Image (cartoon, helix red, strand yellow):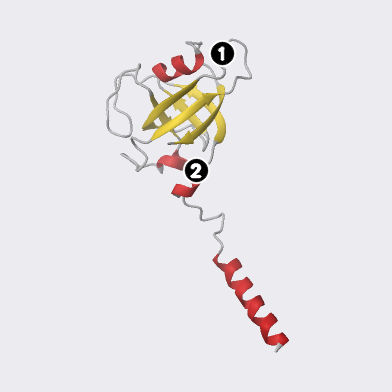
Amino acid sequence: MLACFFSAVLLCSASLVAAAPGSRNHTVTRRDEGWTRTGKGTVYAQEGTAGSCGNWHDDDDQIVALGHFWMKHEYQAERCGRKIRVKNIGSDYDGLGGEGNEIIVTVQDSCDSCGKNHLDFSIGAWNELTDESEWGELNIEWNWL
């Protein structure tokens, strides 16, 4: 009887391990979005073109471009229009201001050179986040709203 019980426990444990998601075939889920992330922020100019979300914006608009981890190399990707809260947590370079500034930006573009936690800001968003500092790279915390 005891052996039967332990066999059942072992079988249940094995099925839970087998059902656990693997990291090799990772897909982004809403659960992935619930975390505060740290990464880097940079700045880009619209240059008179529409972003990958299909919308035209002025350089002063509070928008952001995300890397392909989030945008999946898609035109008008699922995350277009989503809001992100961003906090400037300082820079490894002299001259970038605004540490502690927080802004809310809207996803409107893709960034080919951006990694998972690298956000590329419009000039307007960069200026608000960095107190109009020269372009460079800053450390950020961010989360989906």
Q: Which residue is nearer to you in this view: 113 or 20?
A: 20
* Quadrant assignment, res 36: top right
Is residue 13 found left or right of 55 in the rendered image? right
Q: Which residue is nearer to you in this view: 137 or 60?
A: 60
Residue drawn where x is 44% and y is 39% of the image: 68
The residue carrying mark 2 is 34
Disc 2 secondary structure class: helix
Number of numbered callouts drawn: 2
Mark 1 or mark 2, which has the lower sequence index?
Answer: 2
Q: Quadrant of the C terminus?
A: top left
The image shows residue 141 at horizontal and vertical percentages of 55, 30
The residue carrying mark 1 is 96
Q: Residue furthest right?
A: 2
Residue drawn where x is 47% and y is 42% of the image: 69
Between the C-alphas of marks 1 and 2, the distance is 29 Å
Q: Residue furthest front?
A: 1
The three-letter amino acid code for the residue at tag 1 is: Leu
